[in-house]
Structure formats: structure tokens, C-alpha cells
Amino acid sequence: MTTYTAAVAGASGYAGGEVLRILSAHPDVEVGAVTAASSAGARLGEHQPHLVDLADRVIEPTTAETLSGHDVVFLGLPHGESGRIAAELGDDVLVIDCGADHRLDDAADWERFYGSDHAGTWPYGLPELMTDGGAGRQRDALTDVRRIAVPGCNVTAVTLGLQPAVSAGLVAPTDVVAVLANGYSGAGKAPKPHLLASEGLGAASPYAVGGSHRHLPEIAQNLRKAGAAEVTLSFTPTLVPMARGILATVTARLEPGVTPQGVRSAYAEAYDDETFVHLLPEGQWPTTAATVGANAAHVQVTVDDAVGRVVACVAIDNLVKGTAGGAVQSMNIALGLPESTGLSTTGVAP
Ligand SMILES: NC(=O)C1=CN([C@@H]2O[C@H](COP(=O)(O)OP(=O)(O)OC[C@H]3O[C@@H](n4cnc5c(N)ncnc54)[C@H](OP(=O)(O)O)[C@@H]3O)[C@@H](O)[C@H]2O)C=CC1
Ligand SMILES: CC(=O)N[C@@H](CCC(=O)OP(=O)(O)O)C(=O)O
């Protein structure tokens, strides 16, 4: 059996920490260098006290030298930084970027929403993404690759919630509304005034309202791959006082003649064979709590006849299926390992 070595950049942060938590239990991977920026020189345990087995590792600076010599490099860095460091890493190493730098196909979308030069597009790390209008799955594009761009966490939730309906032509992709409840870890560890506990505890606060969120083009890109000719989407995330989790409620106008049974069948067909996407039994609605710590998306869908809309709800843990779990799942595919190696669908409750 081959053991692969993996370096993790951004090891003091939320995404890097979660990659390390999952890799700690991965049977085929050994953790190598752990790197970051301002925390370089510190024990990992000072920043990630829950990673007991790795607590005495010393955090190194993030350079091409510290990251070299590994089979896999995970990047959990701020936008812009992963493009910079990845350009210095060899083509032989598998680089998995948890940031946004390499997700978008269209450089103009990147420049408009991120305001800098585009670093280039990598194979997209959402294995369950429906491609070719639903005929394919993105996992087929991840075999043997050496670069993977992991999706945004909001994007994962909204895409999984709507792609079966889009692919089957059941809804109008030009009339989509998504409203999300988001846990605070999605915003990273770096301190921001609106993320102070005194501001956030006991409050639900929308952000990036009115078409400004940088995940909009990424969602539209995914829904086009699932079969939409054009996508018009209203997207509103809301910070709620929980550490982890996203609950996405996605609605879209039904095409004429579509029945609730037709909708249910499309979702069952899309997800019945997926290990990490669970279409819940009819009448059971997703809750973020059930997905905490799990590489799992819980999905439910119904039809609101009074308004002629499909309503889908998706719960994920933003740090697992929304980042690190998806990253390791994609790594498994690229390395030729069984896709579910080292990943659990079991959450933590209550
Ligand atoms: N949090 C989430 O739910 C999700 C995050 N992501 C993406 O993952 C990436 C990391 O996010 P997250 O973990 O939340 O952020 P954090 O703020 O929690 O962590 C950022 C990490 O990057 C390091 N870092 C900062 N600047 C530099 C630099 N110039 N060079 C090298 N390392 C640097 C920090 O090191 P130090 O502490 O030493 O300064 C820290 O380890 C982002 O691109 C984010 O968008 C994607 C999906 C979901
Ligand atoms: C609560 C919160 O702020 N969440 C973040 C999610 C970040 C994410 O998915 O990461 P990327 O920046 O890598 O796309 C947001 O909505 O922007």
C-alpha cells in the first residue's frame, strides 16, 4: 500500500485545520509540513488545540521550499495567496486549493468579483457536480489530475440544492432565489468588527446583499454545466450564531406541467448513488446540526403549488463538505483511491 505525504498551508486557519483533522484519520496519508504566515514558529497545538496528535508540530513559513517534497499540498490561504504559491510548485505534486483563485472559468468574472488578475482555471473539486447537462459528473474530470480547485461552501450548498431540477428541465434557471443561514467559521479566523461575539451572538445579519457576493458567478457556472442556458439568481447569505454550518433554501419557478412526483424522481435519480449527498425521506427537512463534522449534504425538496415554485433545502458543514471534506474526496479521486477513503458521513449530535 502506498502512503502519500501531504503538506497543509494555512494550517493555523479554519480550512487548513479541518483538512488536518480529516487527514489525521486518513489511512493512506501522512501529514508532512504544516505552514502558515504570522503563526510560523508556533506549536500547531497553540492554534488548533483539538488536533492532539499533531499538537507538537511546529508551523513553518509558507514557501515553495517548505511545501516541496510532498505528494499532495493543500492550500487554505486567503484569496490571491494560493495563486502566487501554486505557481512555484512543480507539476508533479497534487495541489488542492481550498481558496477561490482557480475556480472560475471566466477571467472576466474573476476580475469583476475579486478585483485582481485571474490566476487560471483548475479542474473543479465538486465530484457530484452534474456536467454536460446532467449526462456526466465532475468526478470523471478529477482522475489523475495534479491541480484541483475546491468550491466555495455556499456554492456547494446551492449547487447541490438545484442542479437536479435544472438538469431535468423542471425549473426556470432565470428565476432562482437562494437565502442562506451561515455559521461564523465561514468567514475565517482573521478578526473583523462585525464578527465580534458581542455583535453576532443573538443576531442574524445578512451580508453581501443585492448581487454583490463573489460566489454568484461560481454558482451560475455550475448550473450552466448542469444544463442551464442562462442563470439569473438572487443570492442572500445571513450570518447566524452558530460556529459551523450552512442551511441553504433555494427556490425556482416551476416549468408548466411539472408534478411533485417528477421533482422527487429527478432528485432521487441524481443522488441515490451518491455517498455524500443524502436525499432525506419525504417530510424530513435538513438541519445543520446533523451534518456537523460529516462529509455530508442533506437535501430535501418539495413543490409549493400556491406560488408555482420548487423549494429545496440543503444543510452542510461549511468546513467539511463545504471545504476540507470535499478537498480530501477530490484528492482520493485524483490519487486513484476509493472516493470515500478517510471520510465519514456521520455527524456530531446534538
Ligand atoms: N472557512 C470556510 O468555511 C471556508 C474557507 N474557504 C477558503 O479557504 C481559505 C482559508 O480560509 P479560512 O481557513 O477560513 O481562513 P483563516 O483566516 O481561518 O486562515 C487563513 C490561513 O492562511 C494563513 N495566511 C494568511 N495570509 C497568508 C500569507 N500571506 N501567506 C501564507 N499564509 C497566510 C493564515 O496564517 P496565520 O494565522 O499564521 O497568519 C491562516 O493559516 C480561503 O481562501 C477561504 O476562502 C473555502 C470554503 C469554506
Ligand atoms: C460566513 C461567511 O462569511 N462565509 C463566507 C464563505 C466563504 C467561502 O466559501 O470561502 P471562499 O471565500 O473560499 O469562497 C462567505 O459567504 O463569503
Image: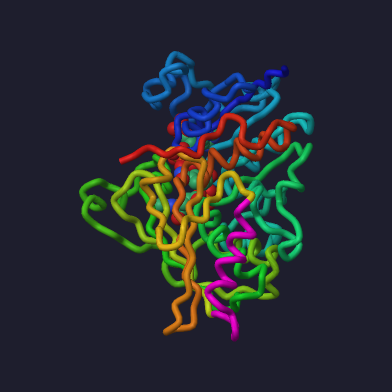
Quadrant occupied by the C terminus? top left
In this view, 288 is above or below 208: above
Residue 78 seen in this snapshot: no
Q: Quadrant of residue 110?
A: bottom right
Quadrant occupied by the N terminus? top right
Residue positioned 71% across, 51% down in the render: 138
Residue 269 is covered by the magenta coloring: yes
Q: Quadrant of residue 92?
A: top right
Residue 118's x, y, as percent?
Answer: 67, 53
Residue 84 is covered by the magenta coloring: no
User: Residues in magenta?
Assistant: 254-272
Residue positioned 35% across, 63% down in the render: 206
Residue 233's x, y, as percent?
Answer: 54, 72
Residue 215 seen in this snapshot: yes
Residue 333's x, y, as percent?
Answer: 70, 37
In this view, 206 is above or below 116: below
In this view, 56 is above or below 270: above
Residue 181's x, y, as percent?
Answer: 38, 58
Residue positioned 60% across, 66% down in the render: 265
